[in-house]
Each structure stands twice: as structure tokens, then as C-alpha cells.
Image (cartoon, rainbow, N blue to C red):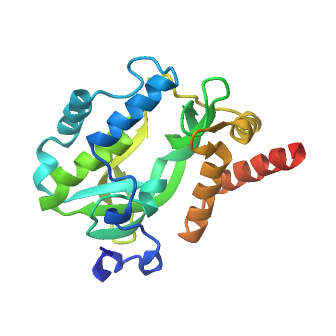
Amino acid sequence: MPFAPHVFRHTPALRGLITPPDQSEMRFGLDRFAELDVQAAEEGWPPGWRMEHDAREANRQAVLGDRMNADLWVFAYGSLIWDPAVYVEEYRYGGLSGWRRSFCMRLEGGRGTHERPGLMAALDEGGRCDGVVFRLPADRVDGETAFMWNREMFAGAYCPVFLEVATPQGPVEALTFVMDQSNPRYMPDVPEERAALMIAHAEGGLGPNFDYLDSLVRHLDELGLEDAAMHRLHARVRAVRSAEA
């Protein structure tokens, strides 16, 4: 089911570029966890490789608290922009000060391995990030955020916090999944040259790590969102891959 036209009244350029939730592979339930648990066991992952269901739900309840019965804004800076996997009532462009996209999360599964880890983008402190905010209507917040927590808090590597996001229509307080700096996967301030080498060489069951970065940059360009640091990193990784081809 496509989004209603009014969802993009402030962002007409996004119309037709956002995956409807009923077509998203990221809208999954507990059966998907069971499948991945089997895969993790086959690959020798240690216990605790993902967040337990009770802990994840307790985190959702604690973060949202009395916000369950009110409209909820969410700040998106990566794949949540173009594939939110939830039913959205409104999109706006948004800018977040004090945080930036950064390939600061070690990736040892999916597009990396224990022996040759890759990197994944997250929000780290410092700088500014341009993205979008989308609004969940009050009557859908409880059900839709359950899907969102399955996805974003799968491994427990983020901290869900509320931050003020500037939009052309005025500031909003938005739920934002930032990097958990206490998580062992956190890799702060990786030099760009080292990050490029890691991304160029890493590959896992979902394919090359570079494909993830390439998709991120292409989508940001398509959506009209600028990020010079992502373009620099993308160019470096391409150079490494071309030199080694």
C-alpha cells in the first residue's frame, strides 16, 4: 500500500522514493530472530550476540514511557529515510546539530566477518547531520515502534534518545538512534584511510561492505541530502578497490 499523498506535502521530492512498509524486508517479527539465531550458531557467534527480546521490549517501554499515546517524530539519517518499514503520516527535511554520520560501528556479520570486519554508519557526536524526520500518528505508535525496535535495537548497539531537530516548518523533538559509545562495537575516530581499507576489503553473507556505503551515498544523492564526508570516504574506497582490481 503506497503512502498517502499528504505524507509528502512538505517534501514532494521524496514522493515515490520511499519504500512502503508492506513492501519492506525490514518490517519483521520474532520469526526472523529465530532464523538469524540458527545462522549465528552455525557461524560460531558467542551467546549475547544480539539483544534479548525482554531486554529490547523493556528498553522500548522505558524510552517511550508516556509518549505511547501521542504523535511521535523520528529522525532518520540512513536507511530509515528511504525504507522506514513503518506507517508514516508526515515527512519533513531535518537537520541535527552536534551529531554526524560516521562509519564508527564495527561490522562482523552481514557485510563483514570476525577475521575481516567492516564498518557500518551510525550517529556519532560532533558536527551536523542532514536527514529527515517522519511522524507516526498516536494510534500507531505502540505497534509501529515494536517493529522499529526489532530493527534498530536488534544488536543493542544504539542508544535511543530524544533530540531537537530543526525543520523548515519549525523544530521538533525526535526519537533518534545514536551510537552507544559503551558498546564494544564502537570504533571512534577511525582515520579515513583505515576506514576505507576496512570497507574495501570486508565482505560477509550479505555481500561486500562497499555495497552498503555505495547504497548510502546513492540514496542520499537521490534524496537531495548532502554529506561531503560520505562522498570523500566513498571516493577513497573506490580508489582502493580500483588499485587492487
Q: Position of residue 214 (x, y in %)?
A: 65, 55
At a point 51% along the width and 20% down the height, the residue shown is 44
Residue 72 shown left or right of residue 234 in the figure: left
At a point 41% along the width and 67% down the height, the residue shown is 19
Residue 149 lies, with reference to residue 50, above or below; the image says: below
Residue at the farthest top position: 46
Residue 18 lies, with reference to residue 101, above or below; the image says: below
- Tell me if residue 156 can be seen: no
The quarter holding residue 216 reads bottom right
Residue 198 lies, with reference to residue 238, above or below; the image says: above
- Tell me if residue 187 can be seen: yes
Q: Position of residue 111 (x, y in %)?
A: 59, 40
At a point 49% along the width and 25% down the height, the residue shown is 42
At a point 39% along the width and 65% down the height, the residue shown is 167
Total number of numbered labels? 0
Q: Position of residue 57 (x, y in %)?
A: 21, 35
Residue 113 shown left or right of residue 88 in the figure: right
Residue 73 shown left or right of residue 41 in the figure: left
Residue closer to the observer: 154 or 91 = 154
Residue 223 lies, with reference to residue 184, above or below; the image says: below
Q: Position of residue 27 (x, y in %)?
A: 33, 53
Residue closer to the observer: 105 or 244 = 244
Image quarter (top left, top right, bottom left or bottom right) of the N terminus: bottom left
